[in-house]
Image (cartoon, rainbow, N blue to C red):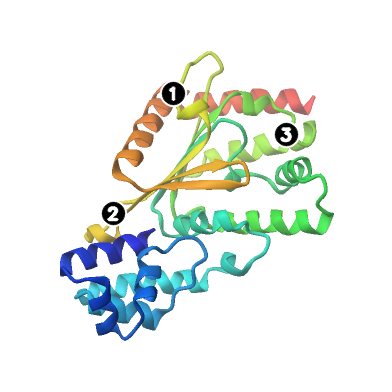
Amino acid sequence: MLIARGLHALLTRSGQTQSAVAKTAGVSVGTVTRYLGWQDRARLRVPTMRAIAEACGATDAERDGLVQLVTDQEAGWWMDDPAVPEVLDPLVSFERYAAYEHVWASQLVPGLLQTPEYAIALHQSSQPRADADTIRATVDARMRRQDVLGDLHLWVVLKESILRDLIGGPKVMADQLGHLIDASREPHITLQVLPRHVGHVAGTGGGPFVILGREDTPDPMAAMAVVYLELHRRGLYLDDTKDVGEYKIMFDHLRSEAENADRSRTLMDEARQEHAR
């Protein structure tokens, strides 16, 4: 999305056609079209990106920024990892670039905060035919994804019912909640619980969503604001300004209605003790 948006901005500013850019860059029109519409696992190459950006009249900084995005994509461990679903490729890429991630968790503990045992229980339930090695590989990939913590500010609003759900048994839940309590004390993690009695507005059906963003850059073209909606066996990414703005308002409403950090830890600890009995 960032690559496509950046190239579209350059192309529009240049006033050229895709054919003219392709001719100057020495590539086919189809190649230019593919780079302009990049999504998911489409393979991009640094020399081609550099040539197209320069053909569009990019400044050195703009060209180097786009080249860096392609370089990061090529180096991403998740791109060739069969344990990472294709739909998550953009999400993991965005997390590596984002300055912040805001999560409305209405059903499950978010992947960035799951313990291995909790994640295993989830996959055993959702993939009953999968063998133990496949599930272990999927969980290992999820744990590796958590390496991004510390490089971005994570803010999660968690529905209180998640604390009482029994995923994997009482011990798994008690350990998971203990992990959440510990995580909530990290300076780069804000965790709030939305009590059962509080109504909320959070998208169609109240489903979970993730907002990823970066605005701490002097180059508007390098800024990012993306919403990820997790659906059954697929995901939806939104980067339209209006769409993102609506989800930001919803998240602001949720965190204003949720308990503060201290009270949220109390609720999590109460639930943890119930599971530990």
Residue picked out by circle 2: 216
| Residue in the picture at 38% in, 74% down | 30
Q: Secondary structure at mark 3?
A: helix
The three-letter code of the residue at mark 3 reads Met
Q: Nearer the viewer, residue 91 or 27?
A: 27
| Numbered disc in front, either 1 or 2 | 1
In the rendered image, residue 206, in percent from the top left (x then y), is placed at 51, 27
Residue picked out by circle 1: 201
In whole angstroms, how far apart are the C-alphas of marks 3 and 2? 37 Å
Q: Quadrant of the C terminus?
A: top right
In the rendered image, residue 101, in percent from the top left (x then y), is placed at 44, 46
- Earlier residue among tags 3 and 2: 3
In whole angstroms, how far apart are the C-alphas of marks 1 and 2? 28 Å
| Residue in the picture at 77% in, 28% down | 276
In the rendered image, residue 260, in percent from the top left (x then y), is placed at 45, 26
Q: Nearer the viewer, residue 20 or 45?
A: 20
| Residue in the picture at 30% in, 39% down | 242
| Numbered disc in front, either 3 or 1 | 1
- Earlier residue among tags 1 and 2: 1
Q: Please tell me in which quadrant of the rendered image residue 80 appears.
A: bottom right
The circle drawn on residue 173 is 3
| Tag 1 and tag 2, C-beta contact below 8 Å | no
